[in-house]
Amino acid sequence: MTAKIIDGTKIAAEIRSELKDKADELKKKGITPGLVMVRVGEDPASVSYVRGKTKASEELGIYSETIVFPEDAKEEEVLAKVEELNKDPKFHGILVQLPLPKHIDSDKVLNAIDPRKDVDGFHPVNVGKLLIGEPFFMPCTPHGVQQLLIRSGYDPAGKHVVICGRSNIVGKPLMAILVQKKKGANATVTVCHTGTKDLAATTRQADILIAAMGSPKAITADMVREGAVVIDVGVNQVGTTAEGKRILVGDCDFDAIKEKAEAITPVPGGVGPMTVTMLMVNTVRAAEMQSA
Ligand code: GUN
């Protein structure tokens, strides 16, 4: 059996076209959704992600700005900028691109963002709301994974979902989303991490396996049950082409797993476009709520 390829680019385009109507509605009322991104330093992955978010904003008519600090910017400078942006009515959404340089306390910066403008869904207030089942903004990558599953016909309800990785950006919020007694969720969720004793024995129990550990091709075919649905959240740079383009692979051994799985997401073209799209969804929603 060769797996169905879950096309994140196509599903993302579907959502963006639905979103364009909402953005146009706001425009008719004289409201332009605004997103500001803060980047510190020149990490190539962060530069590329922020560029992608800018492009998606342009396509939807969302006003966006990027504020770039040098790598050695002081924590106080970044915090002062966040405070200023909290008060700026042009911006309905604020995103601080992670990771931040080591001398800056990311938690302190994320906690400084007004939860009503926290389109990343990383503020503790929004994390708490998600966990109790009353989400305000859902973090973009896990929300994108849920949408990919639902829209490709693999509703997680009643399924055993095994998530590999317990990050605050993906693993933990995805667990919180999929475990809720709600439509498009209601799954039995297991979260594996570096302390998991027999990872392969656990992943083989998955109906839906989600790889989000940030380790190139760490999930091999022997770790996947025949007929499982596999979502690869990993984006790992394993080299650079002669033209200077980043060579990316996921956390899954795609070529081997596609001979065994029912469906799988590619890297790139799977989860990545969904993350950007869900950020756009949150930004439009922020604009709707702040203008209501
Ligand atoms: N770095 C990697 N993923 C993300 C994300 O979803 N949001 C932000 N702000 N930074 C990231």
Image: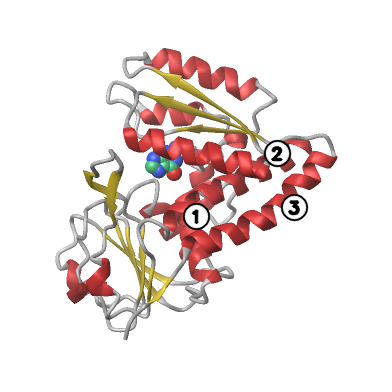
Residue 182: image quadrant is: bottom right
Helix, strand or loop status at disc 3: helix
- How far apart, in angstroms, are the residues tagged by discs 2 and 1? 20 Å
Judge: label 1 CB < 8 Å from ligand 1.
no
Q: Which is more N-terminal, label 2 or label 3? A: 3
Q: Which mark is residue 287?
A: 2
Spot occupied by residue 287 in the image (x, y as percentages of width and height) = 70, 38
Give the label on residue 194, or none.
none
Q: Which residue is outermost to the left?
A: 197
- The crowd level at tag 2 (other Cα within 10 Å; few <14, some 14-19, many 20+) is many
Amino acid at pointer 1: Met
Numbered circle sitting on residue 21: 3
Residue under circle 1?
274
Foreground of the two, 125 or 21? 21
- Mark 2 CB in 8 Å range of ligand 1? no
Lateral position of residue 42 relative to residue 37, left or right: left
